[in-house]
Image (cartoon, rainbow, N blue to C red):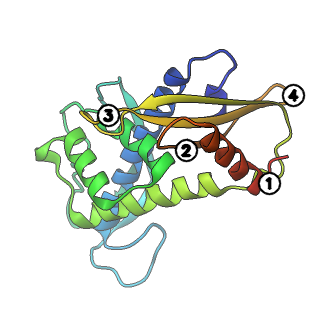
Amino acid sequence: MDELFAVGRDLVEVLEDVARLGARLILQTALEAEVTEFLGRERYARGDRTRAGSRNGYSDVTVKTTAGPVTLERPKLRGTDEVFASRLLGRHVTRSSALESLTIAGYVRGLSTRDVEASLAEALGAEAALSKSTVSRVCQAITDEFDTWARRSLADVELEYLYLDASHFRFHDGARAEPVLVAYGITADGAPRLLAVEAISAESHEAAVGFLRGLVARGLR
């Protein structure tokens, strides 16, 4: 993801690319959650089994989305009593715009199960509705992923240049665009690094100062 923040690229364009990567993450996470629910246990778990069978590697599968084809890793199963049929991998086209908005929302202000459920329903259609437990697993996995990224230490990041930018992004279709601050930089060897993304109530000096203080608190020097 860092490579997307090359100098000179428009921030809106970069956020759209980040969102597309996030949409793939959401679909992959949902697919993993479906398999976990089908088997009745987490990946690698060998405790009490509610269904016969186990995981047996992965195979690539392409999902059609409104933003173009997306390649996922489909878990392969063995020893099951019945064939696993994913609701995600039908012939319909995934309306990925909802998932892309969900991705940015996750990075800048967190997610709720309702957010994930609504976005998945919009993206996949009513015929591919996922169970409450699967949606809950997806929400938790994505939240953990985003929290880890947002709180990671920046103490080992040595920058030659630091860039702050702001743009407006719609978190839901029909909603008003909200301001988003982004910090990224260029290291001594010329590599771009995405540091932080944060939603703010309005563009102001105070918001920018608070944003920078957050970077310092995470170790950026």
Categorize mark 1 by other alpha carbons within 10 Å: few (<14), some (14-19), many (20+): some
**Three-letter residue code for mark 2:** Glu
Task: In the displayed orientation, state which residue is furthest to the front.
Answer: 205
* Mark before the other along the chain sequence, 1 or 3: 3
Q: Nearer the viewer, mark 3 or mark 2?
A: 3
| Circle 4 residue | 189
**Figure check: 110 above or below 11:** below
Mark 2 vs mark 1, CA separation in Å: 17 Å
Residue 136: image x %, image y %? 32, 64
User: Marks 2 and 4: in contact by CB < 8 Å?
Assistant: no
User: Marks 2 and 3: in contact by CB < 8 Å?
Assistant: no
Residue 159: image x %, image y %? 84, 35
Categorize mark 2 by other alpha carbons within 10 Å: few (<14), some (14-19), many (20+): some
Residue closest to the eye, 94 or 121: 121
* Numbered label attached to residue 198: 2
Residue 138 picture quarter: bottom left
* Mark before the other along the chain sequence, 4 or 2: 4
Q: Residue at x 31, y 34 (%)?
A: 176
Q: Is residue 59 visible?
A: no
**Three-letter residue code for mark 4:** Asp
